[in-house]
């Protein structure tokens, strides 16, 4: 799939849908962005709809990537209306490697600390977009793993009303 497959009503849909998140990343991360690499952040509203895409390019090394994630997540939780996040690890080519996995772990850790729902993380390259696993212990993404009362399995297990 690609951004050419986006349904007309995609702005009204939640990016907790991994296929939609991939297509939106494909739309907002241009080929020109992919060549130097960087990080793409899709700031989402509380219901998972896209609020604002942000791209930070040409990040020189792994420590700077982690710092960019940290500052973006900590800033996102202070912005009115931001209730979720999709992160794209952008690079010109290749599949998922150990540095991507390590950065993904940092993204998970920062979202846990900030209590910000991580709707998804993907590696975005010139040849494809690859999903990384979603952590079940993060705050619930809108529409993912919730019953009709908005409770997650963890909430039900803890006896939340």
Image: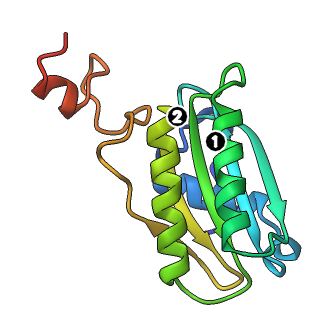
Residue 19 at x, y percent in the picture:
50, 58
Q: Which residue is the extreme one toward the top?
A: 161
Residue 82 picture quarter: top right
Which residue occupies 77% across, 64% down? 29
| Circle 2: element type | helix
User: Is 158 situated left or right of 43 in this image?
Assistant: left
Residue 18 against residue 74 in the figure, above or below: below
Residue 56 at x, y percent in the picture:
81, 59
| Circle 1: element type | helix
User: Is 55 situated left or right of 146 in this image?
Assistant: right
User: How many residues crowd around disc 1 within 10 Å: few (fewer than 14), some, or many (20 or more)?
Assistant: many
Q: Disc 2 versus disc 1: distance between alpha carbons?
A: 7 Å
Q: Which residue is the extreme one toward the front?
A: 63
Residue 125 picture quarter: bottom right
Which residue occupies 57% across, 53% down? 21
- Would residue 4 be visible to someone looking at this image? no
Quadrant showing the C terminus: top left
Q: Which residue is the extreme one toward the bottom?
A: 94
Give the residue pinned by disc 1: 73
Mark number displayed over residue 33: none
- Would residue 107 be visible to someone looking at this image? yes
Residue 161 against residue 123 in the figure, above or below: above
Which residue occupies 30% across, 43% down? 137
Quadrant showing the N terminus: bottom right
Give the residue pinned by disc 2: 114
Residue 132 at x, y percent in the picture:
44, 66
Residue 127 against residue 46 in the figure, above or below: below
Residue 78 at x, y percent in the picture:
68, 24
Q: Earlier in the sequence, mark 2 or mark 1?
A: 1
């Amino acid at each position: 799939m690609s951004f050419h497959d986006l349904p007309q009503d995609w702005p009204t849909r939640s990016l907790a849908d991994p296929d939609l998140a991939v297509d939106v990343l494909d739309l907002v991360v241009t080929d020109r962005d992919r060549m130097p690499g960087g990080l793409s952040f899709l700031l989402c509203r509380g219901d998972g709809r896209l609020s604002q895409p942000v791209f930070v390019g040409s990040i020189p090394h792994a420590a700077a990537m982690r710092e960019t994630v940290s500052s973006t997540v900590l800033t996102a939780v202070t912005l009115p209306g931001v209730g979720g996040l999709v992160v794209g690890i952008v690079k010109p080519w290749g599949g998922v490697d150990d540095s991507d996995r390590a950065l993904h772990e940092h993204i998970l850790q920062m979202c846990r600390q900030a209590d910000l729902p991580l709707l998804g993380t993907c590696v975005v390259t010139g040849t494809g977009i690859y999903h990384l696993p979603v952590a079940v212990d993060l705050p619930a993404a809108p529409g993912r793993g919730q019953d009709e009362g908005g409770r997650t399995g963890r909430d039900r297990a803890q006896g939340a009303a």
